[in-house]
Image (cartoon, helix red, strand yellow):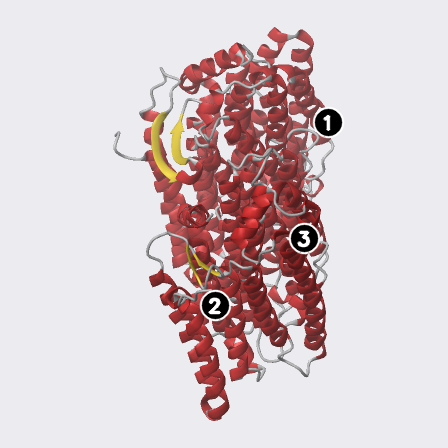
Amino acid sequence: MEFERPDFSLAAAEIFVAVMALVVMVAGTFLRRISRELGYALAQITVIGAAFITVFSVNEPTVRYTFGTMYVSDWLGQVLKLFIYLSVFASLLYGRLYLIERRLEKAEYYVLVLLSMLGAMILVSANNLLVLYLGLEMMTLALYALVAFDRDNGLRSEAAIKYFVLGAISSGLLLYGMSMVYGATGSLDLGTVAQAVYLGAGDETVLKFGVAFLVAGIAFKFGVVPFHMWVPDVYHGAPTPVTLLIASAPKLAGFALALRLLVGGFFGLAPTWQPMLMLLAVASIVLGNLAAIAQNNIKRMLAYSGISHMGFVLLGLLAGVTDGSHQLAFNAYSSALFYAVSYAIMSLASFGMVLLLARTGFEAEHIDDFKGLNRRSPWFAAMMLFVMFSMAGIPFFLGFFAKFAVLEAVVAAGHTWLAVLAVIMSVIGAYYYLRVVKVMYFDEPSERTALVASSETRVLLSANALTLAVAGLMPQGLMSICAYAILTSF
Amino acid sequence: MAGIPLLSLAIWIPILGGLLVLAVGGNDRNAPLARVTSLFAAALGFAVTLPLWFQFDPSTSALQFVEIRDWIPRYAVRYHLGVDGISMPFVLLNSFVTLIVVIAGWEVIQERVAQYMAAFLIMSGIINGIFSAMDAVLFYVFFEASLIPLYLIIGIWGGPNRVYAAIKFFLYTLAGSLLMLVALLYLFYASNGSFEILDWHRLPLDLRTQQLLFLAFLVAFAVKVPMWPVHTWLPDAHVEAPTGGSVVLAAIALKLGAYGFLRFSLPIAPDASMSFQWLMVTLSLIAVVYIGFVALVQEDMKKLVAYSSIAHMGFVTLGFFVFNRLGVEGAIVQMVSHGFVSGAMFLCIGVLYDRMHSRRIADYGGVVNVMPKFAAFFLLFAMANSGLPATSGFVGEFMVALAAVKTNFWIGFVAATTLILGAAYSLWMYKRVVFGPVANERVAALTDIGAREFWMLALLAFFVLLLGVYPAPLLDVMHASVDELLRHVAAGKLH
């Protein structure tokens, strides 16, 4: 067997992040006095540096492999990574004050954030079942620790245990599915697997069982019904900056996981996994929207709303292949990617607002804590209004076009009834978003303290929410990026 | 003036004006500046729509003042604006009403003035967008976006039960319009990737598809009109909304649904429209008669006018679905007239409410003794609301009733009862509120309308009379477009 030197340059961003995570850890140990500021600064520098590396490594839209074929560099990966950097950057910035006020800001926090980002990056670029699994575990293990970061708080620890136990089960399911796939096709490489599936090699029953386990694992990571039990508890229990992180970057990584596995590896078995996704999507959209109505805690409400949004992403994924025709696949997958990215942006802004209202000894977790925000700060009330209407899918906001794209794909695939169901549930979903707008605008404030936030947070959060309006007026740019990413990567 | 994008200006001047108002009047200390800025923006917004009327070529049914730009090439969505004889009058009506609403809220609104004015200005731009959009997605986007400002207007400045009314209004209309979205996506798919409304007019569709599409559109537009039995949000919304909100709701927002029938349902699904004629005529007649009776027993003035709006809009849908020129044109005249008359009615009630903070008919009596000028205006509008000849209310109702008789005598007969019912509820309310001895000390303490209110009502009275005496210019504008529409519907799509 001959060894060739792998092309490290394709994985330069990952290597940079890994090195920097270690630097932050060492610096945190030896430079205790300035470790906090240093940790924060280094983490942000790492994220920005990684973004630069990723941007400059995109030259031509070709799919390139390294480390054998274990690792792939393509547009899909770059686009998702850029949005992952954005999510991590925003979550660090929005969450800083929260952490300082609660004495949680330690260098280890930043190490764990960077490691989970690294895991997400690896996951996004993996082209091999084991590498995929490696990235996934790296990301989630760091997140378990982050959820428990405020270790003296019972709620946090409970959430962490729940997250860990259920996460471990889902990883087990995923591994089991992978082992079946390996057994049936004799390979861990996604390209080889795809070829074997396409040619009909390997035992079909085993493959189908394998796919079922993979879908279950993916569903766990997505947090879609019936594998959603951990979502509200973890969102609620985790410190809000961590919730913010969990609600954005891992969703994008999870999307990559689904796309790489199901589309990259098992496109030939689409008729098998599409109905499974349909079940998951319908259940998520229905249950997510209904359960969100009953919530008084805004983090739980956003958790359930997230479940329904993930259902919409799945709707895009399941609309790819109809009657053996692949014509619509490109359209459907790019709409799902567009939805996932849009959701990440909306999610960042929504939890950013929760963080903006929180201060020492006060979590701003209840919907009633937004009461009369229009009196306290008309500007940020308007920003939250943008986020809520965007999530409800009202034009001119980004969320509308995300729904529009997915529904278009679903109708084109001939599942008109699915689209009708989705829009009916959207109307029900609109209620709880309207409720937030209602308390902000129609109710009198229960307190009149001014908002405490750093100017960077104010600027970035405003930019984040305004993006929803601007991208809603001109959605073409983001749509093309997503379409191009899918087009060049499969 | 080919080079000037008039329709874009009509849309974006109010919207940008609204943002400007928010910027200059962020806190209530700057309220006077916010008011002046909004008046200026509303006046400018109205001024740019005037050339639409004067430069309009009534001899053609083709779209005029067309603007086409790519918007979302990925889905072939274009920023395509244009008006024909049917939509053009509404752009003017809307811009005019916005001006009136800004004047009406001048002194009455003391809290969050900038937000109030901005909401109406933004709303006005969005509604101009609805009437001039010729791309289905553009239409839909404006159609739904119009919910946001009205939701806030009702919820922030409304009456005691405003939250319930605002949420009910929003969810009702959203439920309707989202089903329409599925229909639009289906048509996009069926037409091989076009969102052009005009392409869809020519798209051949079988009867069953047409019927499903018709029903999907019906849900959206019936809620907006509103038609019986999905009208229940309207009285709540009207009662709780501030005066300006009620005016915009009655004068403009209700026209959106009716306009939708003319732009989507009839031309895209002509055969289904024919086959559902019985349904539409029945629903319209129920609205006219049953809701007329409901209006009669109301104790709240705003609710009474709200129900009378539903009855009047029943006349509009009836006019559409008799499928002849007299009926459709009568219905459109009725829409324009109702815009003036119902707007004026709500303003009159607003004038009383600002002074007494009550909308209950029983709290009033003998107002004429203390507010003679106001009583004169109110009388004129109440008469117009009941369809008295020489007011605008008569023209439309008469045309529609005549057209209905031509189709079927009994339909016309039932429809014509509105002339009795309308007179009964409008004039009976008028009698109880305005005539008789002064009911109590609070009425005795009322002051008559000031110059601002006088001119606001006088302007509306002028149009009500003008349209009543000489409706020909409005009819001339729409002849070509209505004829083309009816020819298209009569031809059908099934061959």
Alpha carbon separation for disc pair 3 and 1? 67 Å
Residue type at mark 2 is Ala
Nearer to us in this view, B401 or A226: A226
Residue B80's x, y, as percent? 39, 33
**Identity of the residue drawn at 41% across and 15% down:** B480
**Label 2 vs label 3, nearer the camera:** 3
Residue A155's x, y, as percent? 71, 75
Nearer to us in this view, B104 or A163: A163
Residue type at mark 1 is Phe
For marks 2 and 3, the one nearer the N-term is 2
Residue A388's x, y, as percent? 56, 55
Judge whether residue B355 can be spotted in this image.
Answer: no
Q: Is residue A385 above or below residue B456?
A: below
Disc number placed over residue B293 in the picture, else none: 1
Q: Is residue A422 left or right of residue A405?
A: right
Q: Is residue B402 left or right of residue A22?
A: right
Element carrying mark 1: helix
To which residue does mark 3 refer? A210
To which residue does mark 2 refer? A90
